[in-house]
Image: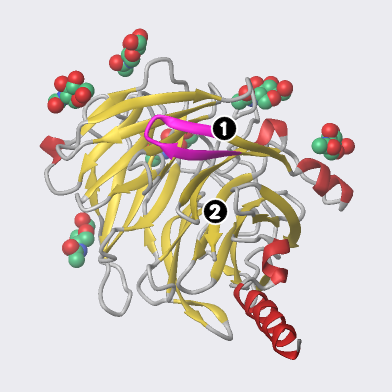
Amino acid sequence: MKLILSSVLLSCAHLALGYPSRFVSADIHGAAYFITNDPINNYVVSADIRSDGSLAYRRAVRAGGSGAHGITTPLGPDALFSQGAIEVSPAGNLLAAVNAGSNTIALFSVDPARPSNIKMLGKPVSSEGQFPMSLAFNSDGTRLCTLNGGKVNGVSCFHIDNKLGLVSLQNTFRSLSLNQTTPATGPAGTASHVIFSEDGSQLIASIKGLPPTPGFLAIWDIANDGSLSANFTSIPPPSGGLLLFSMTPVIGKNALLVTDPIIGFDIVDLGDSSKSSAVNISGQGATCWSSFSKKTGNYYLTDLATSTITEVYIDDNLNGTVVKQYPQQSMSGTIDNDIATIGGNDFLYVLTPNTTSVQVLELKSPGNAAKVQSFDYGKYLNRSKIAFNPVNVQGMSVFVM
Ligand SMILES: *[C@@H]1O[C@H](CO)[C@@H](O)[C@H](O)[C@H]1NC(C)=O
Ligand SMILES: *[C@@H]1O[C@H](CO)[C@@H](O)[C@H](O)[C@H]1NC(C)=O
Ligand SMILES: *[C@@H]1O[C@H](CO)[C@@H](O)[C@H](O)[C@H]1NC(C)=O
Ligand SMILES: *[C@@H]1O[C@H](CO)[C@@H](O)[C@H](O)[C@H]1NC(C)=O
Ligand SMILES: *[C@@H]1O[C@H](CO)[C@@H](O)[C@H](O)[C@H]1NC(C)=O
Ligand SMILES: *[C@@H]1O[C@H](CO)[C@@H](O)[C@H](O)[C@H]1NC(C)=O
Protein backbone atom coordinates (compact mmCIF):
# COMPACT_ATOMS: atom_id res chain seq x y z
CA MET A 1 0.00 0.00 0.00
CA LYS A 2 2.69 2.41 1.05
CA LEU A 3 4.70 1.48 -1.99
CA ILE A 4 1.80 2.11 -4.43
CA LEU A 5 1.04 5.52 -2.91
CA SER A 6 4.61 6.70 -3.16
CA SER A 7 4.89 5.58 -6.78
CA VAL A 8 1.71 7.52 -7.64
CA LEU A 9 3.13 10.59 -5.95
CA LEU A 10 6.37 10.14 -7.80
CA SER A 11 4.67 9.92 -11.20
CA CYS A 12 2.58 13.02 -10.45
CA ALA A 13 5.64 14.95 -9.43
CA HIS A 14 7.33 13.78 -12.61
CA LEU A 15 4.38 14.95 -14.70
CA ALA A 16 4.27 18.30 -12.99
CA LEU A 17 7.96 18.83 -13.71
CA GLY A 18 7.64 17.82 -17.34
CA TYR A 19 4.53 19.89 -18.08
CA PRO A 20 4.35 22.90 -15.79
CA SER A 21 0.64 23.64 -15.92
CA ARG A 22 1.09 27.42 -15.97
CA PHE A 23 2.79 27.06 -19.38
CA VAL A 24 0.12 24.74 -20.74
CA SER A 25 -2.73 27.01 -19.75
CA ALA A 26 -0.94 30.19 -20.85
CA ASP A 27 0.07 28.65 -24.22
CA ILE A 28 2.28 31.61 -25.11
CA HIS A 29 5.07 31.24 -27.64
CA GLY A 30 5.84 34.80 -28.66
CA ALA A 31 4.36 38.21 -29.39
CA ALA A 32 3.37 40.38 -32.35
CA TYR A 33 3.60 44.18 -32.33
CA PHE A 34 2.64 47.22 -34.39
CA ILE A 35 2.32 50.97 -33.70
CA THR A 36 -0.82 53.13 -33.71
CA ASN A 37 1.39 55.97 -35.03
CA ASP A 38 -1.26 58.33 -33.70
CA PRO A 39 -0.39 62.04 -34.14
CA ILE A 40 -1.08 62.80 -30.46
CA ASN A 41 0.07 59.66 -28.62
CA ASN A 42 1.89 56.87 -30.41
CA TYR A 43 1.35 53.42 -28.83
CA VAL A 44 3.01 50.07 -29.30
CA VAL A 45 0.27 47.42 -29.42
CA SER A 46 1.30 43.92 -28.33
CA ALA A 47 -0.46 40.57 -28.62
CA ASP A 48 0.52 37.09 -27.40
CA ILE A 49 1.14 34.40 -30.03
CA ARG A 50 -0.35 31.02 -29.11
CA SER A 51 0.88 27.61 -30.34
CA ASP A 52 -1.63 27.57 -33.21
CA GLY A 53 -0.27 30.96 -34.34
CA SER A 54 -3.36 32.88 -33.25
CA LEU A 55 -3.10 36.23 -31.44
CA ALA A 56 -4.52 37.31 -28.10
CA TYR A 57 -4.56 41.04 -27.27
CA ARG A 58 -2.19 41.92 -24.45
CA ARG A 59 -1.69 45.66 -24.08
CA ALA A 60 -0.86 49.02 -25.62
CA VAL A 61 2.16 50.90 -24.27
CA ARG A 62 3.00 54.56 -24.89
CA ALA A 63 6.01 55.06 -27.13
CA GLY A 64 6.76 58.47 -25.56
CA GLY A 65 6.07 60.52 -28.65
CA SER A 66 3.71 61.22 -31.50
CA GLY A 67 3.12 59.58 -34.85
CA ALA A 68 2.67 61.27 -38.20
CA HIS A 69 1.05 60.74 -41.56
CA GLY A 70 2.93 61.55 -44.75
CA ILE A 71 1.43 64.08 -47.16
CA THR A 72 -0.55 62.18 -49.80
CA THR A 73 -3.94 62.27 -51.53
CA PRO A 74 -6.15 60.58 -50.48
CA LEU A 75 -5.03 60.03 -46.87
CA GLY A 76 -5.02 56.21 -46.68
CA PRO A 77 -3.17 53.43 -44.88
CA ASP A 78 0.66 53.32 -45.08
CA ALA A 79 1.17 56.62 -43.27
CA LEU A 80 4.97 56.31 -43.19
CA PHE A 81 5.50 54.91 -46.74
CA SER A 82 7.72 52.31 -45.08
CA GLN A 83 8.56 48.86 -43.81
CA GLY A 84 10.33 48.52 -40.44
CA ALA A 85 8.56 51.18 -38.32
CA ILE A 86 8.81 48.73 -35.41
CA GLU A 87 11.54 46.09 -35.08
CA VAL A 88 12.63 43.48 -32.53
CA SER A 89 16.01 42.02 -31.65
CA PRO A 90 15.66 38.42 -30.40
CA ALA A 91 19.37 38.41 -29.49
CA GLY A 92 19.08 41.54 -27.36
CA ASN A 93 15.51 41.01 -26.04
CA LEU A 94 14.74 44.46 -27.44
CA LEU A 95 12.08 46.30 -29.38
CA ALA A 96 12.34 49.71 -31.07
CA ALA A 97 9.67 51.95 -32.58
CA VAL A 98 9.66 55.26 -34.44
CA ASN A 99 7.84 58.37 -33.23
CA ALA A 100 7.64 59.92 -36.70
CA GLY A 101 5.88 63.08 -35.48
CA SER A 102 8.36 63.89 -32.73
CA ASN A 103 11.49 62.79 -34.62
CA THR A 104 12.43 60.30 -31.91
CA ILE A 105 13.12 56.59 -31.49
CA ALA A 106 11.86 54.63 -28.48
CA LEU A 107 13.62 51.51 -27.19
CA PHE A 108 11.98 48.83 -25.03
CA SER A 109 13.22 45.73 -23.26
CA VAL A 110 11.22 42.58 -24.04
CA ASP A 111 10.45 40.06 -21.28
CA PRO A 112 11.68 36.81 -22.84
CA ALA A 113 9.27 34.80 -20.66
CA ARG A 114 6.29 36.89 -21.81
CA PRO A 115 7.36 38.92 -24.86
CA SER A 116 4.13 40.92 -24.99
CA ASN A 117 5.41 42.59 -21.80
CA ILE A 118 7.64 45.45 -22.86
CA LYS A 119 9.25 48.21 -20.81
CA MET A 120 10.82 51.41 -22.07
CA LEU A 121 14.61 51.47 -21.78
CA GLY A 122 15.96 54.97 -21.21
CA LYS A 123 14.08 57.84 -22.85
CA PRO A 124 13.14 58.29 -26.51
CA VAL A 125 16.12 59.85 -28.33
CA SER A 126 16.37 62.17 -31.31
CA SER A 127 16.39 60.30 -34.62
CA GLU A 128 18.92 62.95 -35.72
CA GLY A 129 16.71 63.76 -38.70
CA GLN A 130 13.03 64.23 -39.45
CA PHE A 131 10.14 61.80 -40.05
CA PRO A 132 11.94 58.61 -38.90
CA MET A 133 10.08 55.71 -40.58
CA SER A 134 12.23 52.58 -40.56
CA LEU A 135 14.59 50.80 -38.13
CA ALA A 136 17.15 47.98 -38.21
CA PHE A 137 18.92 46.14 -35.39
CA ASN A 138 22.28 44.49 -36.07
CA SER A 139 22.28 40.71 -35.55
CA ASP A 140 23.58 40.67 -31.96
CA GLY A 141 21.33 43.52 -30.83
CA THR A 142 24.12 45.90 -29.87
CA ARG A 143 23.27 48.61 -32.43
CA LEU A 144 20.21 50.18 -34.01
CA CYS A 145 20.04 52.30 -37.17
CA THR A 146 17.19 54.49 -38.34
CA LEU A 147 16.11 55.95 -41.65
CA ASN A 148 14.71 59.49 -41.63
CA GLY A 149 12.44 60.37 -44.56
CA GLY A 150 11.60 64.04 -43.99
CA LYS A 151 13.27 67.35 -44.90
CA VAL A 152 16.36 66.29 -42.95
CA ASN A 153 16.72 62.77 -44.34
CA GLY A 154 19.25 59.94 -44.26
CA VAL A 155 20.42 57.36 -41.76
CA SER A 156 21.91 57.46 -38.26
CA CYS A 157 22.87 54.77 -35.77
CA PHE A 158 22.94 54.19 -32.03
CA HIS A 159 24.82 52.01 -29.61
CA ILE A 160 22.60 50.14 -27.14
CA ASP A 161 23.46 50.66 -23.49
CA ASN A 162 21.72 48.31 -21.05
CA LYS A 163 20.91 51.20 -18.66
CA LEU A 164 20.74 54.34 -20.80
CA GLY A 165 19.12 52.81 -23.86
CA LEU A 166 20.04 54.40 -27.20
CA VAL A 167 23.32 56.32 -27.35
CA SER A 168 24.22 58.20 -30.53
CA LEU A 169 27.09 56.64 -32.49
CA GLN A 170 29.64 59.03 -33.99
CA ASN A 171 30.03 59.23 -37.76
CA THR A 172 26.77 57.52 -38.58
CA PHE A 173 24.60 60.50 -39.55
CA ARG A 174 24.63 60.24 -43.33
CA SER A 175 22.41 62.36 -45.57
CA LEU A 176 20.51 61.03 -48.57
CA SER A 177 19.96 64.60 -49.89
CA LEU A 178 16.40 63.81 -50.94
CA ASN A 179 14.34 66.87 -51.83
CA GLN A 180 11.67 66.13 -49.23
CA THR A 181 9.31 67.78 -46.77
CA THR A 182 8.39 67.07 -43.11
CA PRO A 183 6.22 65.04 -42.97
CA ALA A 184 7.36 63.41 -46.20
CA THR A 185 5.37 63.90 -49.40
CA GLY A 186 4.74 60.63 -51.20
CA PRO A 187 4.54 57.80 -51.67
CA ALA A 188 6.70 58.44 -54.78
CA GLY A 189 10.11 59.95 -54.03
CA THR A 190 10.22 58.88 -50.38
CA ALA A 191 12.59 56.74 -48.32
CA SER A 192 11.29 53.19 -47.72
CA HIS A 193 13.27 50.77 -45.58
CA VAL A 194 16.65 50.27 -43.87
CA ILE A 195 18.39 46.92 -43.22
CA PHE A 196 21.82 45.54 -42.34
CA SER A 197 23.35 43.33 -45.04
CA GLU A 198 23.27 39.60 -44.26
CA ASP A 199 26.93 39.63 -43.11
CA GLY A 200 26.48 42.84 -41.12
CA SER A 201 29.18 44.70 -43.04
CA GLN A 202 26.87 47.20 -44.79
CA LEU A 203 23.82 49.33 -44.10
CA ILE A 204 21.31 49.50 -46.97
CA ALA A 205 18.45 51.98 -47.47
CA SER A 206 15.85 51.82 -50.25
CA ILE A 207 14.36 54.91 -51.91
CA LYS A 208 11.36 55.11 -54.23
CA GLY A 209 11.73 56.94 -57.51
CA LEU A 210 9.77 59.98 -58.60
CA PRO A 211 8.53 58.84 -62.03
CA PRO A 212 10.08 58.91 -64.51
CA THR A 213 13.23 59.14 -62.33
CA PRO A 214 13.98 55.71 -60.80
CA GLY A 215 14.73 55.24 -57.12
CA PHE A 216 17.90 53.65 -55.76
CA LEU A 217 19.50 51.58 -53.02
CA ALA A 218 22.02 53.48 -50.89
CA ILE A 219 24.77 51.30 -49.40
CA TRP A 220 27.23 52.37 -46.70
CA ASP A 221 30.17 50.29 -45.48
CA ILE A 222 30.25 49.79 -41.71
CA ALA A 223 33.61 50.03 -39.89
CA ASN A 224 34.45 47.97 -36.77
CA ASP A 225 33.50 50.87 -34.49
CA GLY A 226 30.06 51.01 -36.13
CA SER A 227 30.75 54.21 -38.10
CA LEU A 228 29.54 54.46 -41.69
CA SER A 229 31.52 55.29 -44.83
CA ALA A 230 31.35 58.99 -45.71
CA ASN A 231 29.53 58.35 -48.98
CA PHE A 232 27.12 55.68 -50.12
CA THR A 233 27.21 53.52 -53.22
CA SER A 234 24.05 53.95 -55.25
CA ILE A 235 22.47 50.96 -57.01
CA PRO A 236 19.69 51.64 -59.51
CA PRO A 237 16.69 49.29 -59.90
CA PRO A 238 16.77 46.78 -62.77
CA SER A 239 15.07 47.78 -66.01
CA GLY A 240 11.30 47.92 -65.41
CA GLY A 241 11.73 48.71 -61.70
CA LEU A 242 11.32 52.19 -60.22
CA LEU A 243 9.79 52.44 -56.72
CA LEU A 244 12.16 50.47 -54.44
CA PHE A 245 10.19 49.66 -51.29
CA SER A 246 10.85 46.80 -48.78
CA MET A 247 14.02 44.68 -48.89
CA THR A 248 14.16 41.00 -47.93
CA PRO A 249 17.56 39.28 -48.27
CA VAL A 250 17.84 36.27 -50.58
CA ILE A 251 19.83 34.14 -48.12
CA GLY A 252 23.35 33.23 -49.20
CA LYS A 253 23.10 35.04 -52.54
CA ASN A 254 24.23 38.63 -51.82
CA ALA A 255 20.90 39.61 -53.36
CA LEU A 256 17.66 41.23 -52.24
CA LEU A 257 14.02 40.82 -53.08
CA VAL A 258 12.80 44.42 -53.27
CA THR A 259 9.07 45.07 -53.58
CA ASP A 260 8.27 47.60 -56.28
CA PRO A 261 4.70 48.92 -56.54
CA ILE A 262 5.26 49.97 -60.16
CA ILE A 263 5.52 46.32 -61.30
CA GLY A 264 5.54 43.78 -58.43
CA PHE A 265 9.08 43.14 -57.26
CA ASP A 266 12.71 43.46 -58.25
CA ILE A 267 15.49 40.98 -57.59
CA VAL A 268 18.67 42.98 -57.03
CA ASP A 269 21.97 41.13 -57.26
CA LEU A 270 24.27 43.32 -55.16
CA GLY A 271 27.42 41.87 -56.75
CA ASP A 272 26.44 41.54 -60.41
CA SER A 273 23.68 43.85 -61.63
CA SER A 274 23.40 41.91 -64.91
CA LYS A 275 21.68 39.19 -62.87
CA SER A 276 19.08 41.62 -61.48
CA SER A 277 15.54 41.58 -62.85
CA ALA A 278 12.11 43.16 -62.39
CA VAL A 279 9.22 40.70 -62.11
CA ASN A 280 5.67 41.57 -63.07
CA ILE A 281 2.90 40.51 -60.69
CA SER A 282 -0.05 40.52 -63.04
CA GLY A 283 -2.92 42.71 -61.82
CA GLN A 284 -0.99 44.13 -58.85
CA GLY A 285 -1.57 47.66 -57.61
CA ALA A 286 0.85 48.49 -54.80
CA THR A 287 3.11 45.60 -53.78
CA CYS A 288 5.12 47.16 -50.95
CA TRP A 289 5.83 44.77 -48.03
CA SER A 290 7.66 41.43 -47.87
CA SER A 291 9.00 38.68 -45.64
CA PHE A 292 10.59 35.25 -46.02
CA SER A 293 9.49 31.86 -44.69
CA LYS A 294 12.28 29.41 -43.85
CA LYS A 295 9.73 26.61 -43.78
CA THR A 296 8.37 27.06 -47.33
CA GLY A 297 11.49 28.74 -48.76
CA ASN A 298 9.19 31.36 -50.30
CA TYR A 299 8.58 35.11 -49.95
CA TYR A 300 5.24 36.66 -49.00
CA LEU A 301 4.44 40.06 -50.50
CA THR A 302 1.45 42.25 -49.65
CA ASP A 303 -0.36 44.65 -51.95
CA LEU A 304 -2.24 47.56 -50.36
CA ALA A 305 -4.29 48.36 -53.47
CA THR A 306 -5.62 44.83 -54.16
CA SER A 307 -5.64 43.48 -50.56
CA THR A 308 -3.78 40.39 -51.79
CA ILE A 309 -0.86 38.32 -50.49
CA THR A 310 1.45 37.02 -53.25
CA GLU A 311 3.76 34.05 -52.61
CA VAL A 312 6.99 34.21 -54.61
CA TYR A 313 9.79 31.72 -55.27
CA ILE A 314 13.35 32.73 -56.19
CA ASP A 315 15.54 29.97 -57.62
CA ASP A 316 19.33 29.54 -57.44
CA ASN A 317 19.77 31.62 -60.60
CA LEU A 318 17.77 34.47 -59.05
CA ASN A 319 14.82 33.82 -61.32
CA GLY A 320 11.69 34.96 -59.50
CA THR A 321 8.22 33.51 -60.12
CA VAL A 322 4.78 33.91 -58.56
CA VAL A 323 3.75 30.68 -56.79
CA LYS A 324 0.27 31.58 -55.61
CA GLN A 325 -1.93 34.51 -54.61
CA TYR A 326 -4.19 34.74 -51.56
CA PRO A 327 -6.82 37.47 -51.88
CA GLN A 328 -7.88 38.88 -48.51
CA GLN A 329 -11.07 40.75 -47.66
CA SER A 330 -11.71 43.40 -50.30
CA MET A 331 -10.48 46.88 -49.29
CA SER A 332 -9.01 45.57 -46.01
CA GLY A 333 -5.68 47.07 -47.11
CA THR A 334 -2.91 44.47 -46.60
CA ILE A 335 0.24 46.32 -45.45
CA ASP A 336 3.16 45.43 -43.11
CA ASN A 337 3.83 41.72 -42.52
CA ASP A 338 6.17 39.41 -40.64
CA ILE A 339 6.64 35.66 -40.14
CA ALA A 340 7.05 33.68 -36.89
CA THR A 341 8.24 30.08 -36.55
CA ILE A 342 6.38 28.47 -33.66
CA GLY A 343 7.08 24.80 -32.88
CA GLY A 344 8.27 24.13 -36.45
CA ASN A 345 5.28 25.86 -38.05
CA ASP A 346 5.48 29.20 -39.87
CA PHE A 347 2.79 31.83 -39.43
CA LEU A 348 2.33 35.02 -41.43
CA TYR A 349 0.98 38.16 -39.73
CA VAL A 350 -0.45 40.85 -42.00
CA LEU A 351 -1.70 44.21 -40.78
CA THR A 352 -5.04 45.10 -42.46
CA PRO A 353 -5.82 48.60 -41.14
CA ASN A 354 -9.13 49.07 -42.94
CA THR A 355 -10.63 46.23 -40.87
CA THR A 356 -8.64 47.27 -37.74
CA SER A 357 -7.19 43.76 -37.67
CA VAL A 358 -4.24 41.45 -38.25
CA GLN A 359 -4.66 38.47 -40.60
CA VAL A 360 -2.93 35.30 -39.42
CA LEU A 361 -2.11 32.57 -41.98
CA GLU A 362 -0.30 29.30 -41.51
CA LEU A 363 2.34 28.69 -44.19
CA LYS A 364 1.92 24.91 -44.35
CA SER A 365 4.00 24.19 -47.45
CA PRO A 366 4.88 25.98 -50.72
CA GLY A 367 1.65 27.16 -52.34
CA ASN A 368 -0.39 26.22 -49.29
CA ALA A 369 -1.17 29.05 -46.87
CA ALA A 370 -4.31 28.70 -44.78
CA LYS A 371 -6.20 31.28 -42.74
CA VAL A 372 -5.89 30.86 -38.96
CA GLN A 373 -7.49 34.02 -37.61
CA SER A 374 -8.61 37.54 -38.31
CA PHE A 375 -7.62 39.29 -35.09
CA ASP A 376 -9.61 42.51 -34.50
CA TYR A 377 -7.49 44.78 -32.30
CA GLY A 378 -9.90 47.70 -32.78
CA LYS A 379 -12.34 46.58 -30.13
CA TYR A 380 -9.58 46.20 -27.53
CA LEU A 381 -8.12 49.64 -28.22
CA ASN A 382 -11.61 51.13 -28.02
CA ARG A 383 -12.26 49.35 -24.74
CA SER A 384 -8.99 50.77 -23.36
CA LYS A 385 -9.99 54.22 -24.70
CA ILE A 386 -6.85 54.45 -26.81
CA ALA A 387 -7.40 56.86 -29.69
CA PHE A 388 -6.28 55.56 -33.05
CA ASN A 389 -7.08 56.00 -36.70
CA PRO A 390 -6.71 53.07 -39.12
CA VAL A 391 -4.98 55.30 -41.70
CA ASN A 392 -2.10 55.82 -39.27
CA VAL A 393 -1.31 52.32 -37.95
CA GLN A 394 1.91 50.84 -39.29
CA GLY A 395 4.59 48.18 -38.75
CA MET A 396 4.51 44.49 -37.90
CA SER A 397 7.17 42.61 -36.01
CA VAL A 398 7.15 39.28 -34.19
CA PHE A 399 9.23 37.96 -31.29
CA VAL A 400 9.47 34.20 -30.76
CA MET A 401 10.32 32.71 -27.33
C1 LIG B 1 12.21 70.21 -54.60
O1 LIG B 1 10.83 69.88 -54.67
C2 LIG B 1 10.00 71.01 -54.83
C3 LIG B 1 8.57 70.55 -54.71
O2 LIG B 1 8.32 69.50 -55.58
C4 LIG B 1 10.30 71.66 -56.16
O3 LIG B 1 9.49 72.80 -56.33
C5 LIG B 1 11.77 72.07 -56.20
O4 LIG B 1 12.08 72.55 -57.48
C6 LIG B 1 12.65 70.87 -55.89
N1 LIG B 1 14.02 71.31 -55.74
C7 LIG B 1 15.02 70.72 -56.34
C8 LIG B 1 16.37 71.26 -56.05
O5 LIG B 1 14.88 69.76 -57.10
C1 LIG C 1 32.52 61.62 -50.93
O1 LIG C 1 31.94 62.36 -51.99
C2 LIG C 1 32.48 63.68 -52.09
C3 LIG C 1 31.66 64.45 -53.10
O2 LIG C 1 31.48 63.69 -54.26
C4 LIG C 1 33.96 63.59 -52.45
O3 LIG C 1 34.50 64.88 -52.52
C5 LIG C 1 34.66 62.80 -51.36
O4 LIG C 1 35.99 62.60 -51.74
C6 LIG C 1 34.01 61.44 -51.14
N1 LIG C 1 34.59 60.81 -49.98
C7 LIG C 1 35.00 59.55 -49.97
C8 LIG C 1 35.59 59.06 -48.69
O5 LIG C 1 34.90 58.83 -50.95
C1 LIG D 1 2.23 43.00 -66.24
O1 LIG D 1 1.34 41.97 -66.68
C2 LIG D 1 0.04 42.44 -67.02
C3 LIG D 1 -0.85 41.25 -67.30
O2 LIG D 1 -0.17 40.27 -68.02
C4 LIG D 1 0.16 43.39 -68.19
O3 LIG D 1 -1.11 43.90 -68.53
C5 LIG D 1 1.08 44.55 -67.81
O4 LIG D 1 1.27 45.39 -68.92
C6 LIG D 1 2.41 44.03 -67.34
N1 LIG D 1 3.16 45.18 -66.80
C7 LIG D 1 4.42 45.38 -67.06
C8 LIG D 1 5.01 46.60 -66.44
O5 LIG D 1 5.09 44.65 -67.76
C1 LIG E 1 12.19 31.46 -64.77
O1 LIG E 1 11.29 30.49 -64.30
C2 LIG E 1 10.14 30.36 -65.10
C3 LIG E 1 9.17 29.42 -64.41
O2 LIG E 1 9.83 28.26 -63.98
C4 LIG E 1 10.54 29.87 -66.48
O3 LIG E 1 9.39 29.79 -67.31
C5 LIG E 1 11.52 30.87 -67.08
O4 LIG E 1 11.99 30.42 -68.32
C6 LIG E 1 12.69 31.11 -66.15
N1 LIG E 1 13.48 32.21 -66.67
C7 LIG E 1 14.80 32.17 -66.72
C8 LIG E 1 15.46 33.39 -67.25
O5 LIG E 1 15.44 31.21 -66.36
C1 LIG F 1 -10.00 51.82 -46.90
O1 LIG F 1 -11.32 52.23 -46.56
C2 LIG F 1 -11.69 53.50 -47.09
C3 LIG F 1 -13.01 53.88 -46.49
O2 LIG F 1 -13.94 52.84 -46.64
C4 LIG F 1 -11.72 53.37 -48.61
O3 LIG F 1 -12.06 54.62 -49.17
C5 LIG F 1 -10.34 52.97 -49.09
O4 LIG F 1 -10.36 52.76 -50.48
C6 LIG F 1 -9.90 51.70 -48.41
N1 LIG F 1 -8.49 51.49 -48.75
C7 LIG F 1 -8.07 50.41 -49.36
C8 LIG F 1 -6.61 50.38 -49.62
O5 LIG F 1 -8.77 49.48 -49.71
C1 LIG G 1 -13.75 51.73 -32.40
O1 LIG G 1 -14.23 53.04 -32.22
C2 LIG G 1 -14.37 53.76 -33.42
C3 LIG G 1 -14.71 55.19 -33.07
O2 LIG G 1 -15.76 55.23 -32.17
C4 LIG G 1 -15.43 53.09 -34.29
O3 LIG G 1 -15.56 53.79 -35.51
C5 LIG G 1 -14.99 51.66 -34.58
O4 LIG G 1 -15.99 50.99 -35.30
C6 LIG G 1 -14.71 50.92 -33.30
N1 LIG G 1 -14.09 49.65 -33.66
C7 LIG G 1 -14.44 48.50 -33.11
C8 LIG G 1 -13.79 47.27 -33.66
O5 LIG G 1 -15.23 48.42 -32.20
Above-or-below relation of 5 to 40:
below
Tell me the magenta residue range.
360-370
Asked if residue 280 lies left or right of residue 146, the reply is left
Q: Which mark is residue 397?
A: 2
Residue 362: within the magenta? yes
Q: Is residue 86 visible?
A: no
Q: Main secondary structure of the magenta part?
A: strand
Of residues 337 and 40, the one nearer the viewer is: 337
Q: Residue furthest front?
A: 1
Above-or-below relation of 228 to 181:
below
Asked if residue 321 lies left or right of residue 371, the reply is left
**Where residue 304 sits: x, y (%)?**
54, 29
**In whole angstroms, how far apart are the C-alphas of marks 2 and 1?**
15 Å
**Where residue 8 sits: x, y (%)?**
70, 79
- Is disc 1 placed on a helix, strand or loop? loop
The residue that appears at 43% across and 48% down in the rendered structure is 193
Instruction: Check the picture and name the quadrant holding the C terminus.
Output: bottom right
User: In the picture, residue 353 is in which quadrant?
Assistant: top right
Whether ligand 5 has any atom under 8 Å from the Cβ at mark 1 is answered as no
Above-or-below relation of 138 to 36:
below
Query: Which residue carries the number 1 mark?
Result: 334
Image quarter where ligand 2 lies: bottom left
Asked if residue 90 lies left or right of residue 199, the reply is right
Above-or-below relation of 172 to 160:
above
Q: Is residue 283 visible?
A: yes
Which comes sooner in the sequence, label 2 or label 1? 1
